[in-house]
Image (cartoon, grey):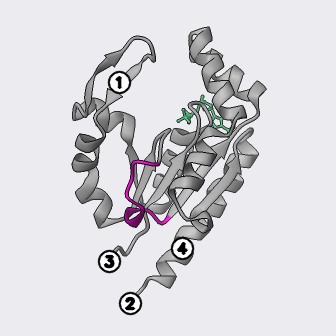
Amino acid sequence: MRTSPNIIITGTPGVGKTTHSEILAERTGLRHLSVNQVVKDKECHEGWSDEYQSWIVDEDKLLDEIEDDVKAGGCIIDWHACDLFPRSWIDLVVVLRVDSKTLYDRLEARNYAEAKLQENIDSEIMEVLLQEAREAFDEEIVVELTSNSSTEMESNIDRIEAWIKQWKTDHAD
Ligand code: DAT
C-alpha cells in the first residue's frame, strides 16, 4: 500500500509537463520522475530515431527500471505517453492542454523542425494524449487542465497540491 500517491503528468511536448512537475515536487516532496531522463540515463532504448528525433523506447526495460520507485509511491511521472503504465500503479493522470498558437510558439522557441512541430500541433488539436489517457485509465482519475499561462499553471499546481493532501488524508492509517 502506498502512503503517497503516484501522478502522471502527460500531454504533447511543450504543454508544460516538466515545469509543472518540478514545481509540484518542490512544493509537495513528491519525486519528479522524468521518463526522458530515465530513458537516456539507464539506456531504456533501442537507439535514436532520426525520423522522429527521439529515442526508440524499450518499454519493458523502462518499466523494470522504474517499478520499485513507483511501487513505493510518491512519484510524479513526467512523460508524453501514459498507456504503458499499469493501472494499479497510478492514482491520478493529469493531461495538460495548450492552444495551438501558444504551443507553436513554445516549440518554435525550442527549435523544433517544421515537420515535427506540425506533427505535435496536430496531435494536440486531435486530443491524442487525452484520448490515450481516457482509454488507458478510469475516467474518474483523468483530469484535463489548460496550461496556456503562468496564472493557469499556478492554479493547476494549487489544485494538484490540494488533491495530494486529500489523497494522503484519505489513505492515512
Ligand atoms: P514539456 O515538459 O511538456 O515539454 P515544459 O515544461 O518544458 O513542457 O515547457 C515548455 C516551455 O513552455 C518552457 O519554456 C516553459 C514554458 N511553459 C510551460 N508551461 C507554461 C505555462 N503554463 N505558462 C507559460 N509558460 C509555460
Q: Quadrant of residue 52?
A: top left
State the residue position of label 2.
173
Q: Is there CB contact under 8 Å for labels 2 and 1?
A: no
State the residue position of label 3.
1
| Residue type highlighted by circle 1 | Trp
State the residue position of label 1.
55
| Residue type highlighted by circle 3 | Met
62 left or right, relative to 119: left
Q: Could you say where residue 107 lies in the image, as x and y percent from the top left?
A: 62, 21
Q: Quadrant of residue 108?
A: top right
155 left or right, relative to 5: right
Q: Quadrant of the C terminus?
A: bottom left
Q: Tell me the mark number nearer the camera, choosing from 1 and 4.
A: 1
Magenta span includes 37: no
Magenta span includes 86: yes
Q: Is there CB contact under 8 Å for labels 1 and 4?
A: no
Q: Residue at x 74, y 48 (%)?
A: 152
Q: Earlier in the sequence, mark 3 or mark 2?
A: 3
- Disc 2 element: loop
Q: Is there CB contact under 8 Å for labels 4 and 3?
A: no
Q: Could you say where residue 121 lies in the image, as x and y percent from the top left?
A: 67, 25
Q: Quadrant of ligand 1?
A: top right
| Residue type highlighted by circle 4 | Lys
